[in-house]
Image (cartoon, rainbow, N blue to C red):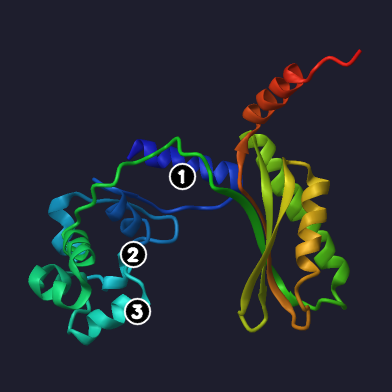
Amino acid sequence: LALAQRIKQAVKDATGLSCSIGITPNKLLSKICSDLEKPDGLTILGMPDIPNRIWPLPVNKINGIGPKAAKKLASLGIITIAELAQAELSFLQIHFGRSYSIWLYEVSHGIDQRPVITDADPKSISRETTFERDLHPRQDRHDLSEAFTALCLQVADDLKHKGYVGRTISIKLRFEDFHTLTRDCSLTTHTADPALIRRAAGECLRRVPLQKKIRLLGVKVSTLSPLESKRRDGALRQRELPLVP
């Protein structure tokens, strides 16, 4: 409890935002519990609490049960996590196959053996913003350009802060009708340079027909590599160059 309160305060101090935290025996339950008392919630749950706190929830509260699986479960009369937990494994296997059925059975009982990994390398670094009002590609071109450049600067700063460089630059656009699309391109070398990121993101943007108002804009850098390894590789290549008289 004390650690969770410290985390919440640290997030508040750093971002000005509240956050909700779930403290449980595993990642599955913590994910569910982080949503139980929003906003600014703090939920502590043990395995004996599952019947009262988890089972009454709809099955789609389990991360990994998407709309299609939830719809199929509903057609079988399974709406809540409790009903899923009471279903026979053999019955689930008829409709979902062996591996997914075992997973459904385990998660409905709060079982999750996945390890908590705190030092995994990031796959990508991104920034995005949702505008207060939908912006017109031509009439609001200045505001869009400023926001686009700011996102590229923020991503570049995040890369440098975390010690990474990237080679694939992507953009994300969500329009007024909520249609979302992405475009990406790959550079010949890894970079964290904001100007190069902005230029590549601009090339991606030019491949999008901008005919509708824009609701969300995002920039992502992936195909990451630790900056130190690139420095070592560069130094090694320099040492291996033949001497020219």
Q: How crowded is mark 3: few (under 14 residues within 10 Å), some or many (20 or more)?
A: few
Earlier sequence position, callout 1 versus callout 2: 1
Q: Distance between the residues labelled 1 and 2?
A: 26 Å
Give the residue number, with chain letter if any, for mark 2.
Answer: 64
In this rendering, the label closer to the viewer, 3 or 1: 3
x then y, percent, for residue 176:
67, 81
Q: Say which mark, if any, is on residue 68.
A: 3
Q: Is residue 197 above or below residue 216?
A: above
Q: Say which mark, if any, is on residue 8.
A: 1
Q: How crowded is mark 1: few (under 14 residues within 10 Å), some or many (20 or more)?
A: some
Kind of residue at badge 2: Gly
Q: Is residue 130 above or below residue 113?
A: below
Q: How crowded is mark 2: few (under 14 residues within 10 Å), some or many (20 or more)?
A: some
Q: Residue furthest front?
A: 245
Residue at point 77% right, 50% down? 197
Q: Quadrant of residue 150?
A: bottom right
Answer whether labels 3 and 2 touch (C-beta < 8 Å): no
Kind of residue at badge 1: Lys
